[in-house]
Amino acid sequence: MPAAGGTARAYVYPRLDSAVWAAAGAPPVARVLGFDPDDGAAALLDDKGQPRRLDLRASEVRFASKARLSAVTSINGSDIYGVTEKGAVARMTPSGDWSFEPPSPARWVFPQPNGSVVIAGDQGSHTHLWLIRPTDEEIIESATLPLVSRAARTQVGDRIYFAVDTGLIGVKTRDLSPVRSIRFREPIQAVVPTPSGDRLYVALKGVNGLSVVDRYTESVTEKVDLPSAASDLRMDPLGQNILVRPAGGGDSAWVVAVGTDRVKGVIRGEWRNDLPAFAPGGHIAATRGGDVALVDAQTLAVTQTIAGGAKDYWYFFVWNGFRPRSAGLDRPVTFESAASAPPADSTAVPQPARDSTPSPPLRDATPTMVEPPAAVAPRPARYIVSFAAVLNEQKANEIAAGITVTGVKPRVAAVPSGTTTIYRVVLGPYVTRDEAERMGRESRRQYWVYEESK
């Protein structure tokens, strides 16, 4: 999407030389909130902070709300949450809107995969939390914390952590019960979790390194040495690398390998809301002046350059809506004469040689439809529920052992990714996405659903 607004375009990665879709009227983009693969729509904030939807099916951009909202967020690209000027929580969905007024003005909203919502609001010297399940307005659980700073807040699996001065305090999203707080010597600058939620990487003000927090021991277990202090962090969706922004700014970022907790190198590029970003295929997209370069995440070598790409706002998503129609669906039906087919109970016997003169057509023969040779039907899409993706098999087994959904325990699947093996904790496959989503919700844990590779 052009950063200044204009015509949005979609490309089938990595073929970035020709667009497969375009729609005029995209606004200047401040931030993309998420993508809804079911409706084929991206939720985003424009430069005025108003939520909109970019619909790939209808090729249009429309407002989700024209109200002035803060703390706008979405967990699935479909349900958009925000806080109104009066402190109420507003939810915008394609089918309708809903609002809720907490006991005191809301500050943040944390939608959960199971449909519940955690709301945070300040009152005096404390931050209050409320757990509700829209569209029911009954408060299921509540909790009170010390006043939370604006420095960092993040969700890690089934927990939400807040920065309070020089410490992290957290609650379980299921019932808002507290977890052990983690203390540091310096104020927290940024926090980012691994996709599985088993570790937190914490940047501290003025400290030349990152602290690695293990959520199971609830303590700092590792350190990552950096050339200088960090100001911002971005995690690879596969949990293999972290992008670290130096506190002094500049047009570069460090790449930290999660497997070794070491800096593997530096990439050049302006730090923006969209870039640098982790792209599919083990690449990092970063600006190069007015262009965008795709950098190999392992070697940090540039593999492709998109001329003029820096003028656009970039967002990578997975969707099969551009998948071409199966050729087998367009196979024509053929016909042949009934007289040419042998009786069903006949026995094949040698036939005398015929001359090359063609026989005249049988005028009174009734055409019989004959099916074409059976084609291998494409396997219907099946869906997997994933709870974690970690680099340690033992850790994956421990996570799997702690999950039971309707009497079923997930399995651990080893998935090669380049030179690394990722261990996924998964359930399924299921024949429909709705069934997979239901199993994920019933687990009461952080999860995501993806289509099984064919």
Image (tube, grey):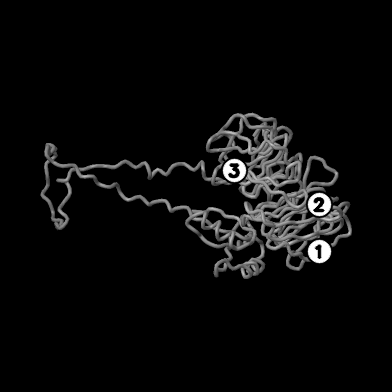
Tell whether 221 sits left or right of 349. Answer: right
Instruction: State the separation of the CA atoms marked 3 and 1.
Output: 39 Å
Q: Is residue 155 visible?
A: yes
Circle 3 residue: 96
Q: Is residue 184 above or below residue 244?
A: below
Circle 2 residue: 122
Q: Quadrant of residue 157?
A: bottom right
- Look at 73% across and 67% down and name the residue there: 216
Of the 4 image quadrants, the one containing the N terminus is top right
Of mark 3 and mark 1, the one earlier in the sequence is 3
Circle 1 residue: 181
Mark 2: give few (<14), some (14-19) or many (20+) Cα within 10 Å.
Answer: some
| Residue 363 vs residue 420, the one in the foreground | 363
Mark 3: give few (<14), some (14-19) or many (20+) Cα within 10 Å.
Answer: few
Residue 402 placed where, x, y %? Answer: 64, 69
Residue 258 placed where, x, y %? Answer: 72, 57
| Residue 318 vs residue 173, the one in the foreground | 173
| Residue 177 vs residue 192, the one in the foreground | 177
Of mark 2 and mark 1, the one earlier in the sequence is 2
Mark 1: give few (<14), some (14-19) or many (20+) Cα within 10 Å.
Answer: some
